[in-house]
């Protein structure tokens, strides 16, 4: 008598593992996007600092006006980029919470599987013990 263990909710466990993997990938993509946006902000800040230093060298009023407009344009872009980074951080936090939930759901199913397997092993052990007891009784009765 060979019994092969199968977990009744194996498909659900597999689905939860797939969901966790997908959320993990989404989290990684969101992190990469955040790093990209932060890199853009760093570049804008560097351009702004460079423009501030160059502003001290400008002599002509038209050049000074153009330079001032350029600095204001950079300030606006920096502000928009900071807002974008904040939104990306919020999105990343939401995905992180989804990932934590997906991990919890998978872990719950794994714990159920472990408990079910332990129950299965106990049942098999009990059946084997019964068979051994019956064989011992039969041998004792024959003797």
Image (cartoon, helix red, strand yellow):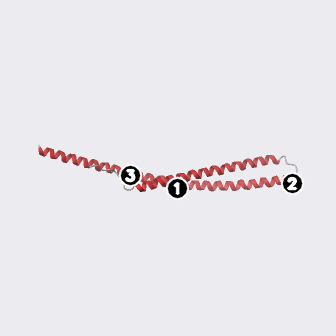
- Nearest the eye: 58 or 134: 134
**Image position, residue 28 (x, y; %):** 56, 50
**Residue at position x 86%, y 54% from top?**
62
- Alpha-carbon span between mark 1 and mark 2: 54 Å
Q: In this view, does 14 lie to the left or right of 41?
A: left
Q: In the rendering, at what x and y percent does residue 42 appear?
A: 69, 48
Q: Name the residue under label 3.
A: 113
Marking on residue 14: none
Q: Residue furthest right?
A: 60
Element carrying mark 2: helix
Mark pair 1, 3: CA separation: 23 Å
Q: How many marks?
A: 3
Q: Nearer the viewer, residue 56 or 117?
A: 117
Side of 131 relative to 85 (left or right): left
Q: Position of residue 111 (x, y in %)?
A: 40, 51
- Sequence-wise, the earlier of marks 1 and 2 is 2
């Amino acid at each position: 008598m060979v019994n092969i263990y199968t977990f009744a909710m194996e498909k659900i466990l597999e689905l939860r593992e797939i969901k966790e993997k997908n959320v993990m990938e989404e989290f990684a993509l969101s992190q990469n996007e955040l790093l990209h946006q932060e890199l853009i902000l760093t570049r804008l800040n560097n351009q702004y600092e460079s423009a501030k230093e160059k502003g001290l060298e400008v002599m002509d009023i038209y050049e000074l006006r153009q330079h001032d407009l350029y600095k204001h344009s950079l300030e606006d872009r920096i502000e928009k980029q900071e807002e974008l980074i904040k939104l990306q951080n919020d999105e990343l936090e939401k995905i992180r919470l989804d990932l934590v939930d997906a991990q919890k759901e998978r872990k719950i199913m794994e714990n159920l599987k472990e408990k079910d397997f332990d129950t299965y092993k106990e049942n098999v052990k009990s059946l084997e013990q019964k068979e051994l007891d019956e064989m011992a009784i039969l041998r004792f009765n024959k003797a």
